[in-house]
Amino acid sequence: MNNTNFDSLGIGASLSRALAEIGYDQPTAIQAQAIPELLAGNDLLGIAQTGTGKTAAFALPILETLIANSVRAQAKCPKVLILAPTRELAAQIRDEVASYARHTSIRYTCIFGGVNQNPQVKTLAKGVEVLVATPGRLLDLANNRHVDLRQVSHLVLDEADRLLDMGFIRDVKKIIRMLPRDRQSLLFSATMPAEVADLAAEILDRPTRIN
Ligand code: AMP
């Protein structure tokens, strides 16, 4: 723990209010390091395990940037794309985004395979600022034009080592080719084998490294 608080890191009133309500009194170490870097627009390579507070470390500054710029997504065109290896992790990230964004008008959803796609298609059609997804279902929906990734301004790859272990590398690369080049990109991984390092080198632009 340290003496900084979320306000001093640059997190504004509506998110700070939610954090106070859910009992986040102080940023964790990874949050204190990551939040100012991400608010400054830098790419980020984070070597971090679950349990460190990494979800808030990336979600809070991205949400703050959307709020500060009054960003509103068009139908089917999310602004933030968070890729996760499993439906459980994707749902957990969505739940955290929901609790941080409770006093904002930010819209979010989570999509994954193994369930009927129709509700997902309907939600995307209304427009969401933040989309959390597993790669396979996202690629299906993108190929069928239910989602358009050309307006994504922030990309997060969470648990990149597991994404690769689970065989998602080709899907992830196809998805990345659908994104604008001009974007902020973040990659988090518990371990850094060569394949993850290669992927990081490919998608990140002069990233800040955080351990
Ligand atoms: P994560 O590493 O993102 O999976 O987060 C681990 C757990 O820590 C989650 O249950 C979060 O809700 C919680 N958490 C994250 N940041 C803080 C914080 N600054 N203060 C208290 N709890 C936190």
Image: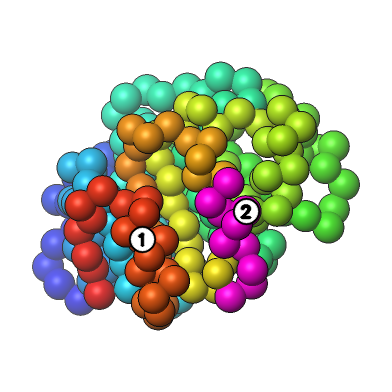
Q: Residue at x 43, y 46 (%)?
A: 155
- Left or right for 114, reference 31: right
Q: Is mark 2 on a helix, strand or loop?
A: helix
Quarter containing the C terminus: bottom left
Q: Mark 1 — residue?
A: 200
Q: Which span of residues is magenta-colored?
A: 165-174
Q: What element carries label 1?
A: helix
**Pointer 2 local density, CA inside 10 Å: few below 14, some 14–19, many at least 20:** some
**Toward which corner of the image does residue 46 lie, by quadrant?**
bottom left
Q: What amino acid does circle 1 point to?
A: Ala
Q: What amino acid does circle 2 point to?
A: Asp
Residue 153 bears which disc, if any? none
Q: Mark 2 — residue?
A: 171
Residue found farthest to the top: 74
Q: Residue at x 36, y 54 (%)?
A: 202
Vertical placement of residue 148 versus 3, above or below? above
Q: Verify whether residue 28 appears in magenta.
A: no
Residue 199 visible here: yes
Q: Which of 39 and 140 is in front in this view?
A: 140
Vertical placement of residue 55 versus 204, above or below? below
